[in-house]
Every structure is written in C-alpha cells, then in structure tokens.
Image: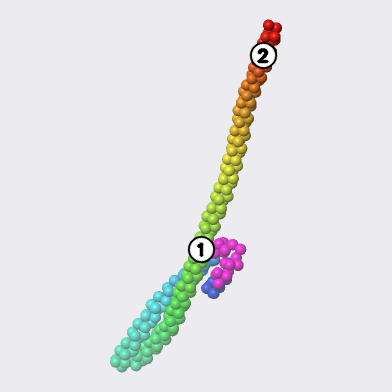
C-alpha cells in the first residue's frame, strides 16, 4: 500500500512532519520519491493524452467550421439560382455543422482547462519531488558526517589504546633498566668491599707480624 492515496495527498502533505515521525527517514524518503515518480509518470501520460485529444478536437472543429462555410456558400448559390428548396437544405446542413462546431469549441475549451490543470499539478509534484530529493541529500550528508565522526572516534580510541600500551612498555623497560642498574651497583659494591676486606686482612697480618718481630727482638736484647 502506498504512502499517498491520491495526488492531492502528496501536494498537501507536510513532508518534513512525516519524515520527522518516521523510524527510518531515509527509507521513508525512498518510498515517497518512488510513489511521487510513479504518480508523475501517470500524470504526464494523462496530460499527453489530453493534449492529443485537444489536437483532435481542434482538427474536428476546423473541419466543422469549413463545412459550415461551404454549406453557407451553397445556400447562397441556390438562392442566386432561384432554388429556395436547395437553399433551405443547404442552410440546414450549415446549421448542423455550425452547432457541431459550437459544441466542439466548448469541448476544446474544457480540454484546455484540463491540460492547464495537469500542467499545474505536474509543476507542484515536481516541486515536492525536488524537496524530497533535497531532504535525502541532507540525510545522506548527515550519514556521511556521522560515519566520518565514528571513524575519527575509533581512530582516537585506537590511538589511545596504542599509547597506553606503548607507555606501559616504556614503564616496564625503565623498571627493567633500574633493576639491572641496581644489580650492577650491588655487584660493584660487593667486589669493592671484598678488595677493602682483603686489604684490611693484609694490614692486620702485617701488624701482627710486626708485633711478633718486635717481641722477638726484645727477648734477644734481654738475653744479651
């Protein structure tokens, strides 16, 4: 079932209000545009048919006028020849074609009005269709902007995640380096302590040796 039931529904509808209430405005626009285009095709076909009828009526009207003029001429000829009986017959034919021409003239005028109305309706429908297409462009542009915005947000989140991971790796690297430096410092301190310890041990031995030598020399002096 279509959105619109007839042409007047289309031209009198508030497209923006309909779209604002739609759950899927873009889908609604496509449906509206399709129905408008279908209606446009029908209206143009009807207008073309009316224009063809106008052309036919115009030709028929011209022929009726020509026939009325010819029978008027024949009536005049019959009068000139003293044939009143023929003149009466000719005048009857003239009247018939003149009445036909008058009726055709009215039909033609009516057809002109129909064609004019078709043309106005088509112009209104084209304006509505243009409006719906413009709205579709706006929605399409919004969709593009939303997609770009989402992509930008995704890139930011991805960049943030990458930066967090990178900062974590850098922190681990700094910790590992600090641990290595501490280990190296402890290693150097242990080696240095060992050297000083050995020097202190050597010095104690030398002192003890000197004392022994001193005591030994003292005893030798006392014995002498």
Magenta stretch: includes residue 19: yes
Number of labels in the image equals 2
Query: Residue 136 versus residue 7: which sits nearer the camera?
Result: 136
Q: Residue furthest top?
A: 224
Q: Say what secondary structure mark 1 lies in.
A: helix
Dividing the picture into quadrants, the one containing residue 12 is bottom right
Mark identifier at residue 128: none
Give neighbour class at mark 1: few <14, some 14-19, many 20+ (Cα, 10 Å): few
Q: Is residue 17 left or right of residue 207?
A: left
Magenta stretch: includes residue 52: no
Considering the image in quadrants, where does the N terminus appear?
bottom right
Q: Are marks 2 and 1 in contact (CB under 8 Å)?
A: no
Query: Residue 107 versus residue 173: which sits nearer the camera?
Result: 173
Say which residue appears at 54% left-offset and 58% top-offset: 143
Give neighbour class at mark 2: few <14, some 14-19, many 20+ (Cα, 10 Å): few
Mark 2 and mark 1: span between their CA atoms?
112 Å
Dividing the picture into quadrants, the one containing residue 15 is bottom right
Q: Is residue 159 above or below residue 45?
A: above
- The residue segment tinted magenta is 14-29
Instruction: Please name the residue that numbered disc 1 is placed on.
Output: 138
User: Does label 2 or label 1 sit earlier along the sequence?
Assistant: 1
Q: Is residue 197 above or below residue 120?
A: above
Say which residue appears at 52% left-offset and 55% top-offset: 148
* Magenta highlight: main SS: helix
Say which residue appears at 30% left-offset and 89% top-offset: 77
Q: Is residue 203 left or right of residue 121?
A: right
Considering the image in quadrants, where does the C terminus appear?
top right
Say which residue appears at 66% left-offset and 18% top-offset: 207
Instruction: Please name the residue that numbered disc 2 is placed on.
Output: 214
Point out residue 84 in the picture as x, y percentages from the top left corner: 34, 93
């Amino acid at each position: 079932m279509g959105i619109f039931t007839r042409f007047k529904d289309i031209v009198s509808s508030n497209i923006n209000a309909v779209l604002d209430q739609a759950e899927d405005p873009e889908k609604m626009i496509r449906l509206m545009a399709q129905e408008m285009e279908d209606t446009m095709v029908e209206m143009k076909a009807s207008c073309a048919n009316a224009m063809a009828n106008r052309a036919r009526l115009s030709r028929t009207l011209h022929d009726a006028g020509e026939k009325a003029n010819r029978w008027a001429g024949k009536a005049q000829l019959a009068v000139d020849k003293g044939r009143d009986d023929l003149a009466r017959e000719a005048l009857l034919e003239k009247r018939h074609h003149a009445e036909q021409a008058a009726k055709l003239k009215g039909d033609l005028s009516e057809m002109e009005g129909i064609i004019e109305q078709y043309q106005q309706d088509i112009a209104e429908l084209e304006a509505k269709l243009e409006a719906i297409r413009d709205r579709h462009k706006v929605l399409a542009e919004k969709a593009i902007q939303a997609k770009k915005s989402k992509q930008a947000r995704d890139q930011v989140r991805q960049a943030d995640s990458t930066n967090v991971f990178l900062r974590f790796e850098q922190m681990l690297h700094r910790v590992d380096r600090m641990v290595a430096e501490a280990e190296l410092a402890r290693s150097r301190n242990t080696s240095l302590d060992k050297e000083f310890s050995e020097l202190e041990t050597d010095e104690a031995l030398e002192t003890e040796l000197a004392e022994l030598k001193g005591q030994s020399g003292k005893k030798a002096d006392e014995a002498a």
